[in-house]
Image (tube, coloured by chain):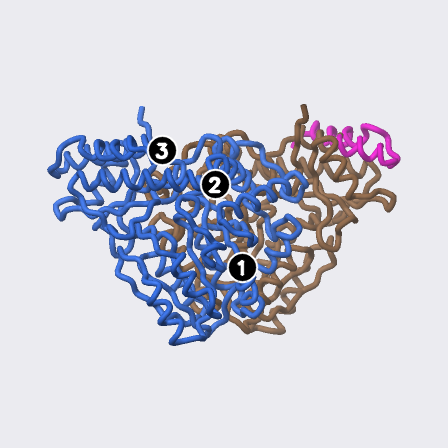
Chain colours: A blue, B brown
Amino acid sequence: MRKTYLLTPGPTPLPSEVLEAMARPIIHHRTPQFQAIIKEAHEGLKYVFQTKNDCFMLASSGTGAMEAAVANLLSPQDTVITVEGGKFGERWTELCKAYGVNCEVIKVEWGKPVESEEIKKRLKANPRIKAVFTTLCETSTGVTNDIEAIGRVIKDTESVLVVDAISGLGAISCASDAWHCDVVVSGSQKGLMLPPGLGFISVSPKAWKLVDSAKCPRYYFNLKKAKKAYDQVDTPFTPAITLIVALCQALKMMREEGLENIFLRHKKMARAVRNAVKALGLELFAPHAASDAVTAVKVPANIDTGKLVKTMRDTYGVTIAGGQGDLKGKLFRIAHMGYIGEFDIITGISCLEKVLQQMGHKFELGSGIKAAEEVFLQGE
Amino acid sequence: MRKTYLLTPGPTPLPSEVLEAMARPIIHHRTPQFQAIIKEAHEGLKYVFQTKNDCFMLASSGTGAMEAAVANLLSPQDTVITVEGGKFGERWTELCKAYGVNCEVIKVEWGKPVESEEIKKRLKANPRIKAVFTTLCETSTGVTNDIEAIGRVIKDTESVLVVDAISGLGAISCASDAWHCDVVVSGSQKGLMLPPGLGFISVSPKAWKLVDSAKCPRYYFNLKKAKKAYDQVDTPFTPAITLIVALCQALKMMREEGLENIFLRHKKMARAVRNAVKALGLELFAPHAASDAVTAVKVPANIDTGKLVKTMRDTYGVTIAGGQGDLKGKLFRIAHMGYIGEFDIITGISCLEKVLQQMGHKFELGSGIKAAEEVFLQGE
């Protein structure tokens, strides 16, 4: 017998209710029966996105939804700002360049959030900036950016604010309307407790104006086509039916728990993980802007993170993530996002303690667990 | 109690083994455990595509894979041939135009297959044609095109042959290599017995040469990125994990039955449906090139197909499809594709008989079923 546990920043574990929903016989998508499901999904997404804007579902990963943002808002030779504070910030730049869009790149030291003042300065210097591409939670570093502050800086300009909320949406707050986010992009396999395969994108009235004039080619990700179908409670192409049925189930669970409670739960788990790893003598990668969705942890030079992750996964069945891009080998990441409760955290920390001891790292056995338990005992 | 039955050309019914596979706890995609699954999927796809070429999996519907073909093979201002014999042939033209590619459209009367001689003539007249975009089985009309003959015409030219095999692959033969298909595109929700959400695309060495020079923008659907990941038994972006796990299950079932047996089964079911509807006094829409995957049936003017489809579905739980595009209201379509056996056909025909009688159509009750049973009794 070998039980397995998933503490990765996408995919995240699936509730049995979601698994059950996917195991139902499939139904056809051009039917009133499926239209009822689409409608429920649209309403539920607006709740999670905290928006009145339409939220479109794409049969794609989150990157597909990011491409939809770029291709629908821009024309070749347009200029935009991209914020690069990690692998997924870099993806915005790569995407824009693929479409011939000029990028003013704001390079942020990995592990730190972007300063909204820097964006303000750049926008002032170049009023022709069409859009600012940012990241809510940078999965590769475990940093949360202050989207609210960025929104304040952008809202009275001609630019639109585009937020990659793939990691984070449904785990930490992304108040799309209150924070003046024009386009918010997400994916299914993180806070939404679903398998990967669905991308989401919300579009504000300000952003629709750009869509009208954008000349980048697009077909599968064409948001005007999507809007036409949306208004008829339909999708332009065959939707990922099974995943949308599962989405309704997950959204129902999220409504029952309530967004505020969900965010509090994530806050508590994140604090437990941070305190635990510090108690084990490890250092946080992003101590001042640590995300409540995923925690990145630095390891001493004598610990091989590849081996740590591999042993936890292959010997003990507990999957966490290593570093990505430039951070490969330099850190590990424990996600506490989606369908995760306190005993999942206890399991993860316990396995971490075990393998760290085996690898010769010095600390008092059980001290990580104790630190986590203290957080959980305190309640809110 | 109300049991439901699905006889639509995508989605098609899901085997319980596939449903079960999707209900398994999810695993992370950057692990040796998932690499084993990717490898199995790649091998199985090559078997079903009848090719030695790499077959890429995309998290998208089939249309996404079609877009991948256009964006990766071409540059703006290139000229191609598109064959339009139905709604999905038209999609090739729409896609090419979205990317600024010039189309020489071969318009084929809906319900008829394209003549390979016409393609030959056009290629001779314009040797700068980069690609010919065709459809294996045109879902909207139930027509199968003679891809083998088209391949013979194209193979010694500079053009590449691109086949939309979304409907048909895994139901009727698409011998990619033997027929000289350079790019074959498919989707999960038809012959492959899966939910929608996966697109597939195979690429021949001749097609890779075009990929190298193509200038259309692409990122999410970039096949060079896909190839780099493929060679490392990986995917460039988060894959639709659950659907790929299910794919392996479906491919295993297909290997056990064997492609030849699968094609014979579809042939027999198609013949049973054709004979049944003729026995009911109805007319085939494509009598001379009828597909073994889906049958389109014309109805007398006094029968409202919308009402027919609606009554079968909402009153009796049997979902078939109406007409698409210009054929809306003019025909209905019964699919016999994927996880379909003879008693599914009997169910569909029985329900059709019942509703046709209720709608006042004159025929001997049971005559459709008798015609179908005769086919099934004959065996192969």
Residue B227, compared with residue B40, is above or below; it is below
Which chain letter matches label 3?
A
Mark yes or no: residue B214 visible: no
**Mark 1, residue position:** A204
Counting from the top left corner in percent of width and height, residue A345 is at 30, 34
Residue A375, compared with residue B81, is above or below; it is above
Q: Residue at x 47, y 49 (%)?
A: B59
Does the magenta segment cover residue B374?
Answer: yes
What segment is highlighted magenta in the picture? Answer: B351-380
Q: Quadrant of residue B92?
A: bottom right
**Mark 3, residue position:** A341
Which comes before the other along the chain, label 1 or label 3? 1
Amino acid beneath label 2 = Leu
Instruction: Specify the label residue A228 is tagged with.
Output: none
Q: Is residue A198 left or right of residue B322?
A: left
Does the magenta segment cover residue A340?
Answer: no
Q: Residue at x 38, y 44 (%)?
A: A10
Q: Nearer the viewer, residue A176 or B33?
A: A176
Q: Residue at x 87, y 37 (%)?
A: B361
Q: Are marks 2 and 3 in contact (CB under 8 Å)?
A: no
Residue B57, compared with residue A265, is above or below; it is below
Q: Residues within 10 Å of mark 1 (few under 14, many from 20)?
A: many
Mark 2 vs mark 3: tell me if same chain: no
User: Please, what secondary structure does the residue beneath circle 2 have?
Assistant: helix
**Mark 2, residue position:** B243
Q: Residues within 10 Å of mark 3 (few under 14, many from 20)?
A: some
- Principal secondary structure, stretch drawn in magenta: helix
